[in-house]
Amino acid sequence: MAINNVTDPPSDPLALIKQTDWASLEHALGPADDTPAALADLLLGTPEAQAKAVRHLNDPVHHQDTLYSATGPAALYVAAILSDPRTDTLVPSREDGQWYPLRQELLEWLGSITDGVSNDVEAVLVRLGLLPGKDPEFTEVRALRPTLFRAVAAFFQDPNLPVREAALAAAVPLLDAPELAHHQASIAPIVRSVLATSLDRGYQAIAVGGLRAWGEETASLVKQEDLECILSTAGGCSDDPPF
């Protein structure tokens, strides 16, 4: 499956950092004047520095799934560098001591951003009496969805399975955007064959939820007794007894 006009890596991606007045933006800890150095480390740092930069993206730039004024600009930069050869590396990450593809980490972060402005999240916010359409951070990230989609689409056929899965998982909530909805039918087969069969229950949940929202059949994807658990917990199901 081909996606036209996939974003090419900029000739000088670090110039994107300089174009933003980060001190005027905020993340969870206040002014985001420490974010430029973290973003630069994604390309220039050692694997350990790259992993630290990813942690900076997760907290404070997107602390506890909250969108800040620095979140959108950071997402644009991450999208712009995904195809840069310097992101094709492994980084030490997470608490299990394993090394993971940096691109997978960045795609998963973008997925967390895009999920935060999905139709489902919007519906929850409205039920709580909030007005996401008047939230500048929410509307800014929503406006970025076509650009983010073009960036993640470059990895739908990536030979590295974790990267491929992370790209598809990031794309599913992006296709809530009316201007991207026409991609649903063409992407559904690969979401079904790759994401819904993942060993990662979180990815399974994203696949099943997305396919359901697109009007696709999902009953055959997982055992019936697991379907409700997967959809309600996004991977929190367990065979262990509840104690």
Image: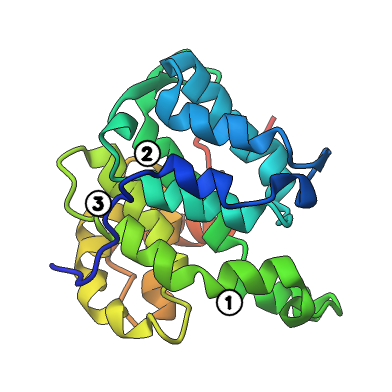
Q: CA distance from mark 2 to mark 1?
A: 24 Å
Q: CA distance from mark 3 to mark 2?
A: 10 Å
Total number of numbered discs in the rendering: 3
Residue visible at 51% across and 18% down?
Answer: 49
Viewer-nearest residue: 155 or 4? 4
Viewed as shown, does residue 95 lie left or right of 159?
A: right
x and y percentages locating residue 181 in the rendered image: 37, 83
Viewer-nearest residue: 197 or 135? 135
Viewed as shown, does residue 106 lie left or right of 159?
A: right
Report crowding for label 1: few under 14, some 14 to 19, many 20 or more residues within 10 A (C-alpha). some
Residue at image mark 1: 119
Viewer-nearest residue: 223 or 132? 132
x and y percentages locating residue 123 in the rendered image: 68, 79
Q: Amino acid at mark 2?
A: Gln
Residue visible at 34% across and 56% down?
Answer: 152
Quadrant assignment, res 98: top left
Comes first in the chain, label 2 or label 1? 2
Residue at image mark 2: 104
Q: Quadrant of the N terminus?
A: bottom left
Kindly state the secondary structure of the residue where label 1 is placed: helix
x and y percentages locating residue 160 in the rendered image: 20, 37
Comes first in the chain, label 1 or label 3? 1
Circle number at residue 155: 3
Quadrant assignment, res 139: bottom right
Q: Is residue 225 above or below residue 3?
A: above
x and y percentages locating residue 88 in the rendered image: 28, 31
Kindly state the secondary structure of the residue where label 2 is placed: helix
Viewed as shown, does residue 80 lie left or right of 55?
A: left
Q: Is residue 20 above or below residue 91?
A: below
Q: Nearer the viewer, mark 1 or mark 3?
A: 3
Q: Is residue 63 above or below residue 185?
A: above
